Image (spheres, rainbow, N blue to C red):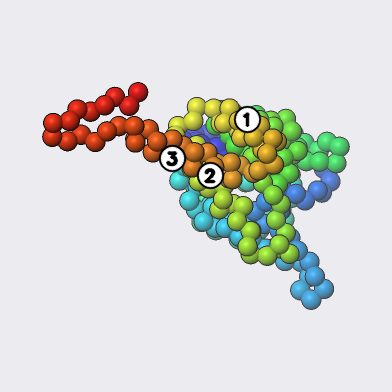
Amino acid sequence: LMIRRPPRSTPKPSSAASDVYKRQLDDTLINSNWNRERGWRVFKRPGVDPFLEHLAQFYEMVVFTDQLLTYGEPILERLDPKRYVTHRLYRESAQYKHGEYIRDLSKLNRDMERVLYISSKPKSAEMNPENVIPIQPWRYEDGSTDTALLDLMPFLESIVRLGVADVRAVLSSYKEEMNRTGKDIPQIFRERQQKFQKKRLEQAKQVAPIGRGRKKIDAW
């Protein structure tokens, strides 16, 4: 979960939950994998290191996990030894409903216009769907060619650099196109950027060069 800087206060946990349902941290930033030879191992998703390091410049980053603190904390210590993640929220900060751990993002004590929730399981933020950025889950078996996190970085950075007032309005536009075309947010972003650059070039061509004895022609 990402919140545009500058942060000031500490997120507040919501009501306690029970039972185990691994999902949020798992398959989005990491994957817990087992085989007979080595038993259980936790693997980082490709691109997670540069993703955290770069975007920490622009966002207050919060990690949610369905795990208890005693299990989740050692994983996060290894995942983020430089502490790019500002806050770590565990199972106690979720509500257990119908077999799912649900996060109420409004409990973070943050302006919801500035909150982005990136998850391989969007249903986990069903109380705040307008803030969700869906991402494909990653498994160790998928290999090292996954680029989902790296592909998201230009879009996330642009939100900050362009000073977007309400991220929910931007996400609504992208999700409408996602539903219509089946494309993901990074792909839509790239195509929109290409169209924007093409339009700028076309507008520039409408302006005649200024030289000796020539007047500038109004492009509009």
Task: Specify which label sits upstream in the sequence, 2 or 3.
Answer: 2
- Kindly indicate the quadrant of the structure image that contains residue 112: top right
Farthest residue to the bottom: give it.
37
| Residue of label 3 | 197
Q: Are marks 2 and 3 in contact (CB under 8 Å)?
A: no
Q: Closer to us: mark 1 or mark 2?
A: 2
Pick the residue in front: 117 or 133: 133
User: Which residue appears at 54% of the width and 42% of the height?
Assistant: 191
Disc 1 to disc 3, C-alpha distance:
23 Å
Q: Closer to us: mark 1 or mark 3?
A: 3
Q: Quadrant of the C terminus?
A: top left
76 displayed left or right of 15: left
Task: Specify which label sits upstream in the sequence, 1 or 2.
Answer: 1
Farthest residue to the left: give it.
212
Pick the residue in front: 58 or 73: 58
Residue 16 visible to the viewer? no
User: Which residue appears at 58% of the width and 45% of the height?
Assistant: 186
| Residue of label 1 | 172
Kind of residue sitting beneath label 3: Gln
Q: Residues within 10 Å of mark 2 (few under 14, many from 20)?
A: some
Relative height, residue 71 to residue 11 (above, below)? below
Element type at mark 1? helix
| Residue of label 2 | 190
Q: Which mark is residue 134?
A: none
Image x and y of residue 30, in percent: 67, 57
Q: Residues within 10 Å of mark 1 (few under 14, many from 20)?
A: some
Kind of residue sitting beneath label 1: Ser
Image x and y of residue 77, in percent: 60, 57
Q: Residues within 10 Å of mark 3 (few under 14, many from 20)?
A: few
User: Which residue appears at 75% of the width and 38% of the height?
Assistant: 123
Residue 202 visible to the viewer? yes
